[in-house]
Image (cartoon, rainbow, N blue to C red):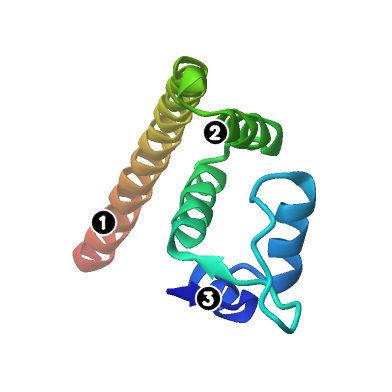
Amino acid sequence: MSYSIAEVAERSGLSADTLRYYEKIGLIDAPPRDSGGRRTYAQDDVEWIAFLLRLRSTGMPLRLMKEYADLRRIGSVTADRRKDILVEHREEIHLRMAEMQAFLDVLDYKIRHYAAIVADEMSEEQDA
């Protein structure tokens, strides 16, 4: 099955301009074109774009995404470096998650604090 750039844009949530940009910088391979010169994407292309979006949504820098894409093109001899990129990025995600948990802990503390103040005020009003 093949997809037009509009179909891939709709499926991925990216604009056609972003897909062309990703092609230009080498994140995605230039897809073949139909007789009218329009890009035709294969299912593998759609899945690769979905993977790139996952990397992007986890905060992976574009330069690392590009390195990963370049290594992927070379083939299985780069599997070790590609794994390293993902392992290092996973470690970054864990650090960010720990930081976010610390932020949540502070917010939870403040929410409990204000809930106690409100409860005290309501108790004082009932006593009056």
Q: Nearer the viewer, residue 18 or 117?
A: 18
Q: Is residue 64 left or right of residue 44?
A: right
In the rendered image, residue 107, in percent from the top left (x then y), is placed at: 41, 42
In the rendered image, residue 120, in percent from the top left (x then y), is placed at: 27, 53
The residue under label 3 is: 3
- Identified at 65% across, 51% down, the residue is 29
Tell me if label 2 and label 3 are in contact, CB under 8 Å. Answer: no
Q: Is residue 67 left or right of residue 95?
A: right
Among numbered discs 2 and 1, the one appearing first in the sequence: 2
Q: Is residue 91 left or right of residue 5?
A: left
Q: How far separated are the C-alphas under marks 2 and 3?
A: 22 Å
Quarter in which the N terminus is drawn: bottom left
The residue under label 2 is: 72
Q: Is residue 21 above or below residue 92?
A: below
- Mark 1 surroundings: few (<14), some (14-19) or many (≥20) residues within 10 A: few
Residue type at mark 1? Answer: Ala
- Mark 2 surroundings: few (<14), some (14-19) or many (≥20) residues within 10 A: some
The residue under label 1 is: 119
Q: How far separated are the C-alphas under marks 2 and 1?
A: 59 Å
Q: In front of the other: label 1 or label 3?
A: 3
Could you say whether the residue bearing mark 2 is in a helix, strand or loop?
helix
- Identified at 49% across, 65% down, the residue is 42
Could you say whether the residue bearing mark 1 is in a helix, strand or loop?
helix
Quarter in which the C terminus is drawn: bottom left
